[in-house]
């Protein structure tokens, strides 16, 4: 059986935003290849700039979420980490974590964070 690696939600969103920055620069470099066709070069430059602007919005949004996240001490590595939702993983050692007493001992499943799963549980 393959071992599942869990990722912290905050780090996953930050990685997505960083990927958008690299994608934006890549799109702009492709635009430079079309220097002779000015309108095409302009389109690529604008698309790359939009990707970088969207990345900035994502970074701002995850920063706001991070300030509201619950900060706990991981029981495995004993380092402070932030949790979003009912289940999350440690930022450092990727240990599955939960603050919900009903989920302790159950297999780690990120679907516990969805509202549909909560509604089914309450029925």
Image (cartoon, rainbow, N blue to C red):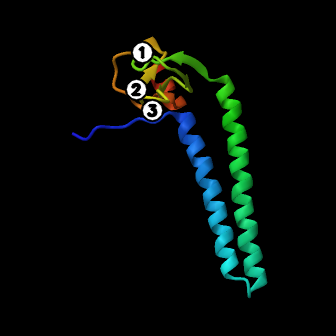
Which one is in front, 16 or 26? 26
- In the rendered image, residue 40, in percent from the top left (x then y), is placed at 73, 80
- Does label 2 or label 1 sit earlier along the sequence? 1
Q: Is residue 123 visible?
A: no
Q: Are marks 2 and 1 in contact (CB under 8 Å)?
A: yes
Q: Residue furthest bottom?
A: 36
Between marks 3 and 1 in the image, the one whose residue lies nearer the viewer: 1
Describe the element under mark 3 as helix, strand or loop.
Answer: helix
Question: x, y (%) of residue 87?
Answer: 47, 25
Q: Residue at x 66, y 30 (%)?
A: 65
Lower sequence index among marks 3 and 1:
1
User: What is the CA distance from the residue labelled 3 to the residue labelled 1?
Assistant: 19 Å
In primary-sequence order, the first of circles 3 and 2 is: 2
Report the residue marked by disc 1.
75
The residue tagged with tag 2: helix, strand or loop? loop
Give the quadrant of the N terminus. top left
Instruction: Give the residue pinned by disc 3.
Output: 110
Depth check, mark 3 against mark 2: the one in front is 2
Q: Nearer the viewer, residue 39 or 77?
A: 77
Left or right: residue 81 compared with residue 47: left
Q: Is residue 23 visible?
A: yes
> Could you say where residue 110 lies in the image, as x and y percent from the top left?
45, 32
Q: Residue at x 66, y 36 (%)?
A: 62
The structure residue drawn at horizontal position 73% and vertical position 78%, both measured from the top left corner, is 41
User: Residue at the spot x=50%, y=33% of the render?
Assistant: 8
- Give the spatial CA distance, label 2 vs label 1: 9 Å
Estimate the x, y position of residue 117 in percent, counting from the top left. 47, 28
Looking at the picture, tell me which residue is in the foreground, 86 or 95.
Answer: 95
Q: List the residue tagged with mark 2.
A: 95
Tell me: residue 46, above or below residue 95: below
């Amino acid at each position: 059986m393959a071992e599942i690696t869990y990722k912290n939600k905050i780090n996953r969103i930050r990685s997505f935003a960083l990927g958008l920055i690299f994608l934006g620069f890549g799109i702009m470099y492709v635009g430079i290849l079309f220097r002779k066709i000015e309108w095409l070069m302009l389109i690529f430059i604008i698309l790359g700039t939009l990707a970088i602007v969207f990345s900035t919005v994502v970074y701002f949004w995850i920063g706001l979420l991070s300030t509201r996240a619950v900060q706990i001490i991981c029981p495995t590595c004993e380092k402070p980490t932030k949790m979003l939702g009912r289940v999350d993983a440690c930022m450092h050692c990727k240990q599955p974590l939960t603050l919900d007493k009903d989920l302790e001992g159950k297999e780690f499943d990120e679907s516990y964070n969805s509202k549909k799963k909560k509604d089914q549980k309450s029925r």
